[in-house]
Image: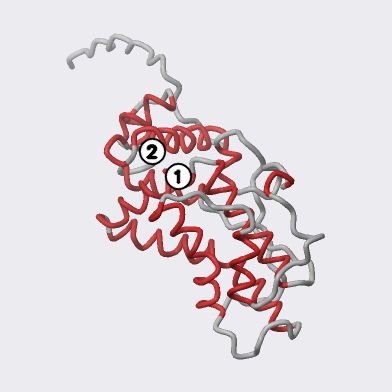
């Protein structure tokens, strides 16, 4: 019987492995978002994320089989719906959601992350399917608000909630991603007035500089990036988005 010499111990990898638990996962997701934000899709590689997360590339591959799979997880954690307001007035509830969306567009890396993700989704059918699913979930709070308002008699019974949601949100996407123009004060109320035919009273409509800071209720990616608290998507029992 031949003897086997013990192998020499491998040098320790100074980088931390991804251990189990939410904290380690958040560290990698945070690194993935930072790489995507700074370098866009061309620079979004497993090597780049591993370096940023201070982890071994082989360890990342044990958890995600490709950069696309990691991007999916990172973006899924990023695109969380807003909490659903319920003030009893449709114009106030919609204004709350649109105001939060405007802050997301103006005060966070969301536009750059979304642009890179859309670019990736155009090239990868799996990412395109995920993007469609995430978009549906981001629309849900507006749809819930419209359904509640219809049940209260504030909106017509034959309202097309899907179309109205398009009309309420599209002007802000167009301004930011197509026209590259600033979103002016008062645009939220103007859009609501044109689409729903109702405007908040002057005493209830706040100027942009009086808005609440980014605090609890903000999307989950803010927590991952260390800027706030994870939002909890709220939906009333029995309510339907469609």
Does 94 sit above or below residue 105? below
Closer to the camera, 196 or 123? 196
In the rendered image, residue 20, in percent from the top left (x then y), is placed at 52, 35
Identify the residue position indicated by label 1 in the image: 74
Closer to the camera, 58 or 158? 158
In the rendered image, residue 23, in percent from the top left (x then y), is placed at 57, 34
The residue located at (32%, 37%) in the rendering is 44
Does 5 sit above or below residue 108? above
Residue 48, image quadrant = top left
The residue located at (41%, 37%) in the rendering is 37
Q: How far separated are the C-alphas under marks 1 and 2? A: 10 Å
Q: Secondary structure at mark 2?
A: helix
Q: Earlier in the sequence, mark 1 or mark 2?
A: 2
185 vs 4, left or right, is right
In the rendered image, residue 140, in percent from the top left (x then y), is placed at 57, 67
Kindly indicate whether the residue at mark 2 contacts the one at mark 1 (C-beta within 8 angstroms).
Answer: yes
Q: Which mark is residue 36?
A: 2
Closer to the camera, 186 or 226? 186
């Amino acid at each position: 019987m031949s003897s086997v010499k013990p192998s020499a111990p491998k040098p320790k990898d100074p980088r931390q492995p991804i251990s189990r638990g939410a904290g380690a996962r958040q560290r990698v997701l945070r690194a993935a978002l930072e790489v995507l934000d700074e370098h866009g899709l061309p620079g979004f590689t497993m090597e780049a994320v591993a370096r940023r997360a201070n982890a071994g590339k082989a360890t990342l591959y044990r958890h995600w089989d490709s950069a696309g799979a990691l991007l999916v997880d990172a973006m899924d954690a990023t695109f969380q719906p807003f909490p659903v307001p319920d003030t009893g007035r449709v114009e106030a509830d919609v204004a709350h959601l649109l105001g939060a969306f405007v802050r997301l567009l103006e005060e966070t890396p969301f536009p750059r992350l979304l642009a890179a993700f859309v670019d990736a989704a155009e090239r990868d059918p799996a990412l395109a399917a995920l993007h469609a699913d995430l978009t549906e979930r981001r629309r849900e709070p507006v749809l819930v608000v419209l359904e509640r308002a219809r049940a209260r008699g504030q909106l017509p019974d034959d309202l097309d909630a899907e179309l109205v949601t398009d009309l309420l949100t599209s002007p802000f996407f167009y301004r930011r991603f197509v026209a590259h123009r600033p979103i002016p004060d008062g645009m939220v109320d103007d859009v609501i007035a044109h689409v729903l035919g109702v405007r908040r009273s002057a005493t209830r409509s706040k100027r942009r500089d009086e808005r609440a800071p980014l605090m609890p209720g903000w999307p989950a990616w803010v927590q991952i990036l260390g800027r706030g608290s994870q939002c909890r998507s709220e939906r009333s029992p029995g309510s339907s988005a469609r």
